[in-house]
């Protein structure tokens, strides 16, 4: 599901991609998550603030990604991945880099209220 407002987007992916082997949300986020393909294909990008936390048996990973999109716009993304029920769940908020505080605020609200049936 994708919700947009102007240059901001909230994407929620409730368990689309299957976990292969041991769950590794950090590697999935960095190397495989389709929603971060623009980050991986950009000629300029950065990653930071990667944090892993364990809640019960769940390993959760968050990260901050930036890149230049196809229109030359500097984009920032805050990303959350957790492996639940054999699948990766994603919450991603993107927006203009110069409005990062709004991206972070929306991300914090979305991840604080994210619940799954798994």
Image (cartoon, grey):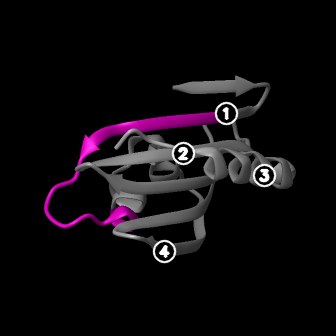
Question: Of discs 2 and 1, which sits in the foreground?
Answer: 2
Question: Considering the numbered disc 1 on the image, is that residue within a helix, a strand or a loop?
Answer: strand
In the rendered structure, which disc, 2 or 4, sits on the residue that comes first in sequence? Answer: 4
Q: Which residues are magenta?
A: 10-27
Question: Considering the numbered disc 4 on the image, is that residue within a helix, a strand or a loop?
Answer: strand
Q: Give the residue at mark 4.
A: 52
* Residue located at (26% from left, 48% from top): 85
- Between the C-alphas of marks 1 and 3, the distance is 13 Å
- Between the C-alphas of marks 2 and 1, the distance is 11 Å
| Disc 2 + disc 3, Cβ < 8 Å | no
Question: Considering the numbered disc 2 on the image, is that residue within a helix, a strand or a loop?
Answer: strand
Q: Is residue 46 found left or right of 107 in the rendered image?
A: left
Q: Nearer the viewer, residue 79 or 37?
A: 79
- Between the C-alphas of marks 2 and 3, the distance is 18 Å
- Between the C-alphas of marks 2 and 4, the distance is 15 Å
Q: Give the residue at mark 3.
A: 97
Label 2: how many Cα within 10 Å (few below 14, some 14–19, many 20+)? many
* Residue located at (19% from left, 67% from top): 22
Q: Give the residue at mark 2.
A: 91
Label 4: how many Cα within 10 Å (few below 14, some 14–19, many 20+)? some
In the rendered structure, which disc, 3 or 4, sits on the residue that comes first in sequence? Answer: 4
Question: Of discs 1 and 4, which sits in the foreground?
Answer: 4
**Could you tell me residue 104's position as x and y percent?**
76, 54
Q: Give the residue at mark 1.
A: 9
In the rendered structure, which disc, 2 or 3, sits on the residue that comes first in sequence? Answer: 2
Question: Of discs 1 and 3, which sits in the foreground?
Answer: 1
Question: Of discs 3 and 4, which sits in the foreground?
Answer: 4
Q: Is residue 91 visible?
A: yes
Is residue 92 in the magenta section? no
- Between the C-alphas of marks 3 and 4, the distance is 23 Å
Q: Quadrant of residue 73?
A: top right
């Amino acid at each position: 599901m994708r919700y947009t407002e102007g240059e901001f987007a909230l994407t929620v992916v409730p368990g689309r991609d299957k976990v292969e082997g041991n769950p590794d949300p950090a590697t999935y986020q960095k190397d495989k998550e389709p929603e971060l393909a623009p980050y991986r294909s950009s000629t300029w990008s950065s990653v930071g603030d990667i944090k892993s936390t364990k809640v019960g048996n769940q390993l959760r990973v968050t990260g901050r990604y930036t890149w230049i999109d196809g229109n030359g716009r500097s984009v920032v993304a805050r990303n959350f991945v957790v492996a639940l029920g054999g699948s990766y769940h994603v919450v991603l908020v993107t927006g203009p880099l110069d409005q990062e505080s709004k991206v972070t605020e929306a991300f914090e609200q979305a991840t604080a209220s994210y619940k799954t049936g798994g």
